[in-house]
Image (cartoon, rainbow, N blue to C red):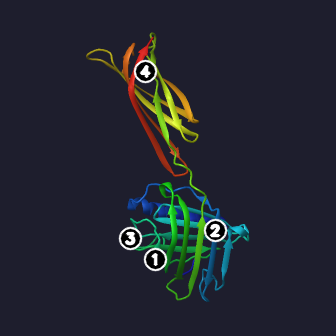
Amino acid sequence: MRRYATPMKSYRRIGALVATMGLLAVLSGGLMTSVASAARAQTGTLTMTSDEGDYIGQGRPWSYDTSANDAFDSTSTGRTIQVSLQAANADWWYLNFAAPEGQTLAVGAYDSATRYPFGGPGAPGLDVFGNGRGCNTLTGSFTVAEVTFGPYGALERFAADFVQHCEGGEPALRGRVQIVNPPAPDPLAIGLGLAADGTADRVGGGATVSGTVTCNTPTTMYVHGTLRQRANRLTVASGQFYRQVACTGTTAWQSTVRADNGVPYNPGSAELNVYATAYDAYYGRNVDATKAGTVRLKR
């Protein structure tokens, strides 16, 4: 049974679902915890030939190139690579390649591939589909001629040859894809600084503490902290605060803390523990920073 022709927007949703299922497989395999954002290739080519009777390629040759204004995008997890093509003539294709679970895709031959992401745990995955046509089941193989990754599985270069047979048939779709992506950005890095001095509010019993956040690219940081001060041998003032900070390089923050148990803060030393987190949208990961120190509270 063959997949019916599907409008472009619907098939994009199918492609997104395939990518999501691939990510779930990676997460369950423990290989990586994030997927780099889609990258638009600087250069890319796709050539395919189709045997008579091959449903996907319709028995004809296909050829695409960024020099002809054909657009190539890719996502990767280290184990999996998906290349998508939106051609200037409105053709569209998705190409999925996957190493067996627990492995990173590397240069070499991958035989006995089955349809990604529905293959067995020890089998490589392959699925080439587009223009409204795809295989329900397939067998095939592919050979990775070149593959390089940047931080967190961001794809830099990829070249592979593939052979695909639909529904157990003999006719094959054969092809070669090659892409070069622009350099991936540096991962988000953040830091925290604590001011040595703070203030104790004589009237309300609260305290004000401050510091800085740093980031290598503008981002929203969420700053959480706990201020703890021993009032006497039996009593401790302890309170928490939360701030959202728009970080642009080095950015100051300040927050007022009130003890959860109503004990007032007084002049003197207090222990400040601060935790900050931000989201790296390109690499799909949270980035954390912590800082602890002694703050001198004054009136």
Q: Earlier in the sequence, mark 2 or mark 4?
A: 2
Instruction: Classify residue 174 by image quadrant.
Output: bottom right
From the top left corner, tell me how far across and down residue 114 is, in percent: 46, 76
In space, the residues marked 3 and 2 are separated at their CA atoms by 31 Å
The answer to whether one can see residue 201 in this image is: yes
Foreground pick, 264 / 69? 69
Q: Can the viewer see residue 272?
A: no
**x and y, in percent, of residue 60 in the image:** 66, 84
Q: Earlier in the sequence, mark 1 or mark 2?
A: 2
Question: In the rendered image of this protein, does residue 171 appear above or below residue 14?
Answer: below
Q: CA distance from mark 1 to mark 2?
A: 21 Å
Q: Amino acid at mark 4?
A: Arg
Decide which of tag 3 and tag 4 comes sooner along the chain.
3
**What kind of element bears circle 2?**
strand
| Dot 1 or dot 4, earlier in sequence | 1
Mark 3 vs mark 2: give the one in front: 2
Residue at 54% in and 28% down: 252
The crowd level at tag 1 (other Cα within 10 Å; few <14, some 14-19, many 20+) is: few
Mark 3, secondary structure of its residue: loop
Mark 1, secondary structure of its residue: strand
For disc 2, the marked residue is: 44
Q: Earlier in the sequence, mark 3 or mark 2?
A: 2
Figure quadrant of the C terminus: top left
- Residue under label 1: 109
Give the quadrant of the N terminus: bottom right
- Residue type, numbered disc 3: Pro
Residue tagged 4 = 258
